[in-house]
Image (tube, helix red, strand yellow):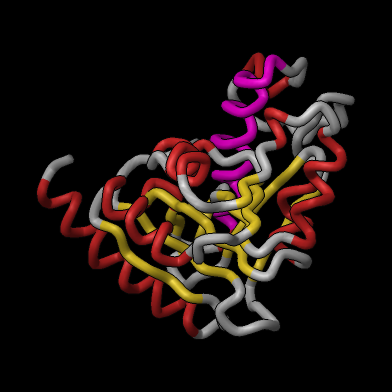
Amino acid sequence: MDENIRKRNELLAQKVIRGLATRNMTGYYAEDREAALRLALELIPEGSTVTMGGGMSVHEIGLVEALKAGDYNFIDRDEMEDKRAAMLAAYDADVFLASSNAITEDGVLVNIDGNSNRVSAIAQGPKTVLLIVGMNKVCCDVDSAMKRARNVAAPINAQRFGLSTPCARTGACSDCKSIDTICCQFLVTRFSRHPGRIKVILVNDVLGF
């Protein structure tokens, strides 16, 4: 990454972290993927029950592999036959892992979901929500964050899952009502009722979609 871009991201991350603090959420800065992994493991106590929603960023920093190899009760829905049971386990977990489709410069989280297990767990249930977010997902305001979620994250995920949606064919949102739509639920998290429950690690790298 260009050094000027890296420095700009570092400064912007501090602004986002200050914004998160005003919203009862806690932000952290990681200079790269390796630092993000170390920080995440510091924030997850050994012995914790950990689950996750779909989050490429969590995989990309190596966190899933580290949890499987460590002293954690990691519930991997991809390895469970009963997917519903795995999703329901998230609501009583110690730590729920995910990313965010977008985050604003002043700390608002914007997420969309198809099955809605991810957005519902972010909103309520697990004791701690830990989000791994690349600086490529920072947007100037909620409107641009929503546009990013619908026109960047959603089409790529629809293609990744092999879904038959207009956005999978065109690369842009058409506000569809396809049976395959992954834009079923929209969650805008502007404040956390429980101080520090939601923790965000901002990574100075391009992660996820």
Q: How many marks?
A: 0
Q: Is residue 40 above or below residue 16?
A: above
Foreground residue among 106 and 31: 31
Residue 48 or residue 18, whichever sits in front: 48
Q: Which residues are magenta?
A: 143-162
Image side of residue 97 versus residue 65, left or right: right
Q: Quadrant of residue 23?
A: bottom right
State the quadrant of the N terminus.
top left
Q: Main secondary structure of the magenta part?
A: helix
- Expressed as whole percent of the image width and height from the top left, the position of residue 85 reads 85, 42
Q: Give coordinates of residue 4: x percent, y percent.
A: 12, 51
Identify which residue is drawn at 67% across, 32% down: 173
Residue 57 visible here? no
Residue name at image x 57 percent, y 36 percent: 153
Q: Considering depth in this image, is 21 or 49 the residue closer to the camera?
A: 49
Residue 148 within the magenta-colored segment of the rendering = yes
Reply yes or no: does residue 168 show up in magenta: no
Residue 163 position within the rendered picture, expressed as x and y whole percent measured from the top left: 74, 18
Q: Nearer the viewer, residue 90 or 60?
A: 90
Tell me: residue 92, above or below residue 179.
below
In this rendering, is residue 70 above or below 155? below
| Residue positioned 67% across, 20% down in the render | 161
